[in-house]
Image (spheres, grey):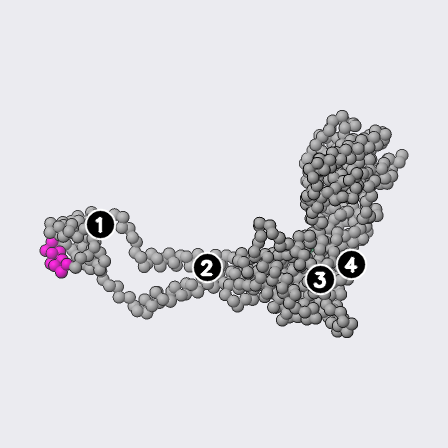
Amino acid sequence: MKKEKRPQRSILLGYLAVIAVLIALNMFFMPSILESQVEEVDYSTFMQMTEDKEIGSVEITSTQITFTNKDNTKIYKTGPISDPELVDRLYDSGAEFKTEIVKQMNPILYLLLTFLLPVVLFAVLGYFMNKKLRDKMGGGSSMMFGMGKSNAKVYVKSTSGIKFSDVAGEDEAKDLLREIVDFLHNPEKYREIGATLPKGALLVGPPGTGKTLLAKAVAGEANVPFFSISGSEFVEMFVGNGAAKVRDLFKQANEKAPCIVFIDEIDAIGKKRDASLSTNDEREQTLNQLLTEMDGFEGSKGVVILAATNRPESLDPALLRPGRFDRRIPVELPDLKGREEILKVHAKKIKIADNVDFGAIARAASGASGAELANIVNEAALRAVRDGRKFATQSDLEESVEVVIAGYQKKNRMLSTKEKLIVAYHETGHALVAAKQTDSAPVHKITIIPRTSGALGYTMQVEENEHFLMNKTELENKIATLTGGRAAEELIFHEITTGASNDIEQATKLARQMITKFGMSSFGMVAMETGGNTYLGGDSTLTCSAETQTEIDRMVIDLVEKEYKKASKILEENIDKLHELSKYLYEHETITGEEFMKILGE
Ligand code: ADP
Ligand code: MG
Ligand code: ZN
């Protein structure tokens, strides 16, 4: 999948050589002009000095007369005047005099130097520039500088070696893509019934969920040419260049049909065209060209466009309408089963113990994307090597989940006894509030070993059965759980610390969302904010009057306050368990969900 990268050094050396030759030539043709010490005088002075025999030597050329004084200490020059008696006078004065010798150069050498050399130099320069540009553009261009060439990489069957079986989970996406591949292989089957091939399919989903991987798998499975290009590669310095590249890409695709064109990160060119001040002509032209090209070919020809993005809401609506990208294939974060499968796919690449419980790891890594899971497996293998083992084990995987999510253990950060105690109570506070509200194991594991991410303690949530809806009570409980850490600190130490900043942030965000987005307040079903990226997060904007905003702020404060009180009450009622659990956590630094529930149930 990698483009070959030619060494940049030879290009640099080439440039240096050319520059050196130019400098040398310059010195050769224009002899040094150190004329600063030469004094310019008028002709009459020259004549007078000649009369007075004050002249040492003279050199006469067609453009100037250079002469020195008697002791050769000063140099003068003057312009020549038609003066036939000059020679006689100079002879009389006893000065040495000469005129320039016309250097009769070998005519062939002369021709070479004046005519051929520059041509050769330019050719060399041009060659290097061309080569460099062509390297940058992916090669294969016969055009000077390769302008306007799309640099799509072409793959034929299974060059990348990735198959659908390498993509775990994402069954819906795979089914839709498999159908497209099948269409390209057996068009008659579909044509018989009158179905036309979908022109385009857009893969949308959060980063790291396997969109690019899926496209590569399509390339590996389909028996047709596969053009792959990234959206950003269209955007060029010169207006019109991107459009030319789009044209070229589709020309190639039409010639090679049936084939698949894959445009990764299409949001780079597919951004909404709007009337904002910061318009980008180049991008808009490129997008317009893309729209035109997508209309231009018939579906029956067999060119399918795949594209991937994690910012679907920023795409131009014209791009999304049926007839262009007919299909939108969601590639979401994997669920529990998906995570387990992805772990297994990647575990095949490393040596791993037979008795590993992938389900447990998948449960611990809730919310992780495919890329993160791949990373977890690799971390486990690295850990095994570090410990000098021949294969990775369950505990390697467990530790690497924490590493990927919370960073490495900080070996040398020593918490003071007091701080460690506060952290133990804080984390237990969260867990206890959660456990008492739901009557189930709230955590997979709590540790109070500092991590490189800056977390002093860390709680891994369990997620026994996933659900996609949350009701109001659950959300309120979640806010209460988030405030539980701070509540425990205050209850036990009568003092609050900075350790709760992350909890506060999350609690506030949740409370605000309940009011402005989920319609769970006295405002009813009125949306108070818009925007925000579905997959990348990011801020949304409030769309209400200033008074309402003030009211929202008030309501957020009240809601969090209410849940904080609830958490404090739960902790007060269970203060013995709080002490007991915190003591255990303080001593052992780690407590698992089962141990936690056992102590709680005693
Ligand atoms: P994106 O959706 O951002 O394009 P990629 O396709 O580049 O993500 O995925 C990055 C890496 O994550 C892949 O190379 C692969 O190792 C891993 N990965 C992501 N999703 C999956 C999956 N469903 N099955 C197997 N590996 C996956
Ligand atoms: Mg990608
Ligand atoms: Zn906390």
Q: Alpha-carbon neighbours of circle 2 within 10 Å: few (<14), some, or many (≥20)?
A: some
Which quadrant of the figure contains the N terminus? bottom right
**Of discs 4 and 3, which sits in the foreground?**
3
Per the rendering, the mark at residue 14 is 2
Q: What residue sits 48% from the left and 56% below the top? A: 12
Q: Is residue 84 magenta?
A: yes
- Total marks in image: 4
Amino acid at the residue labelled 3: Pro
Q: How far apart are marks 3 and 1 (CA)?
A: 83 Å
Q: Is mark 3 on a helix, strand or loop?
A: loop
Residue 456 at x, y percent in the picture: 72, 36
Q: Does the residue labelled 4 lie within 8 Å of ligand 1?
A: no
Residue labelled with disc 3: 322
Q: Distance between the residues labelled 2 and 3?
A: 52 Å
Which quadrant of the figure contains the C terminus? top right
Q: Alpha-carbon neighbours of circle 1 within 10 Å: few (<14), some, or many (≥20)?
A: few
Q: Is residue 549 left or right of residue 562?
A: left
Per the rendering, the mark at residue 40 is 1
* Quadrant housing residue 513: top right
Q: Which of marks 4 and 3 is nearer the N terminus?
A: 4
